[in-house]
């Protein structure tokens, strides 16, 4: 075989091996990157006691949150922590030893802020219809050492106890729904989750002198107020925060009930301060947080 041919054949073989080696290096590099990313994700992704995945977040400077890995939870985290007027009010007005009731159809992140402020001698009771979010708050409370002051229960809150449904639009999170009795006929385009429903007076019959009640739900809060009326009357320093939506609450009887038993009406400002108001002024607003305060 001529020397020139042998040289060309050797060069081609060498180039072939080099290309093969280059492809192997690229594959190994990509695999290494994916393995690294997977390990980071796997470390960040944990499971609570019911096998539901959650990830760790830090909020309000140093509070650890085990947040469920769904878009609603992460949206709720932003709404409850970033430039939120209720959070600002809590920071300025809650104190060590206070007792708080938080009734919410959200992830309940502010429950942890409350627990931090009220310290070991305080108590916060969190009610949410979905056990998924209750489990998340319980796990977060343990992570922060708050477990002896946070009492979280999977109940929808109304004016009496019954087996109910949380009815929501299809493709919307179940927690955005409205509480209905279990014989409610679910309309087309809606789904429902079976829940337990109770009232605050039934849940906490011996509790008194509550400092703050927060009602952050997606429906008229009149039944919640009516079902807590005994506790409200026993709590002389009570303030009540309500998430106001004009489309739902413009004509709520709950507001008149509270005003008639000695509460004054205020709007919570972005910095947590209060602005005095009245029913007619409130009806001009689309959304805000209202605070009813004992006179």
Image: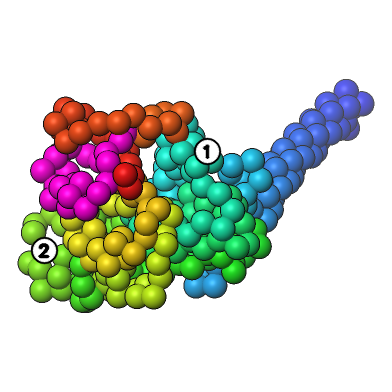
Whether residue 81 is visible, yes or no, is no
Task: State the residue position of label 1.
Answer: 92
Q: Position of residue 235 (x, y in %)?
A: 37, 60
- Quarter containing the C terminus: top left
Q: Position of residue 187 (x, y in %)?
A: 8, 59
Residue 224 relative to residue 29: left or right: left
In depth, the one of 247 and 295 nearer the eye is 295
State whether residue 264 is above or below residue 205.
above
In depth, the one of 217 and 269 nearer the eye is 269
Image label count: 2
Span highlighted in magenta in the image: 244-267
Q: Position of residue 118 (x, y in %)?
A: 57, 54
Single out the residue that lies furthest toward the right.
Answer: 3
Residue 2 relative to residue 256: left or right: right
In depth, the one of 89 and 6 nearer the eye is 89
Task: State the residue position of label 2.
Answer: 186
- Quarter assignment of residue 141: bottom right
State whether residue 182 is above or below residue 88.
below
State whether residue 2 is above or below residue 155.
above
**Residue drawn 25% across the image and 31% down it:** 277
């Amino acid at each position: 075989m001529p020397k020139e041919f042998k040289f060309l054949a050797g060069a081609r073989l060498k180039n072939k091996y080099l290309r093969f080696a280059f492809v192997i290096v690229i594959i190994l590099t990509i695999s290494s990157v994916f393995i690294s990313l997977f390990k980071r994700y796997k470390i960040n992704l944990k499971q609570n006691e019911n096998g539901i995945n959650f990830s760790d977040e830090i909020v309000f400077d140093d509070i650890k949150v085990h947040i469920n890995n769904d878009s609603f939870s992460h949206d709720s985290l932003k709404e409850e922590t970033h430039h939120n007027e209720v959070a600002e009010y809590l920071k300025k007005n809650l104190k060590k030893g206070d007792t708080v009731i938080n009734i919410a159809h959200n992830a309940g992140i502010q429950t942890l802020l409350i627990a931090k402020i009220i310290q070991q001698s305080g108590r916060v009771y969190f009610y949410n219809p979905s056990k998924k979010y209750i489990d998340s708050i319980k796990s977060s409370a343990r992570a922060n050492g708050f477990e002896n002051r946070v009492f979280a229960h999977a109940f929808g809150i109304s004016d009496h106890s019954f087996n109910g449904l949380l009815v929501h639009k299809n493709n919307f999170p179940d927690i955005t729904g409205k509480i209905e009795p279990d014989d409610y006929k679910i309309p087309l385009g809606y789904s429902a989750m079976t829940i337990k429903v109770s009232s605050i007076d039934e849940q906490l019959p011996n509790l008194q002198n509550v400092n703050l009640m927060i009602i952050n739900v997606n429906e008229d809060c009149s039944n919640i107020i009516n079902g807590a009326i005994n506790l409200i009357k026993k709590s002389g320093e009570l303030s009540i925060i309500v998430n106001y939506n004009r489309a739902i609450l413009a004509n709520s009887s709950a507001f008149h009930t509270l005003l008639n038993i000695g509460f004054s009406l205020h709007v919570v400002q972005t910095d947590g301060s209060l602005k005095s108001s009245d029913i007619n002024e409130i009806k001009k607003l689309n959304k805000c947080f209202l605070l009813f305060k004992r006179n």
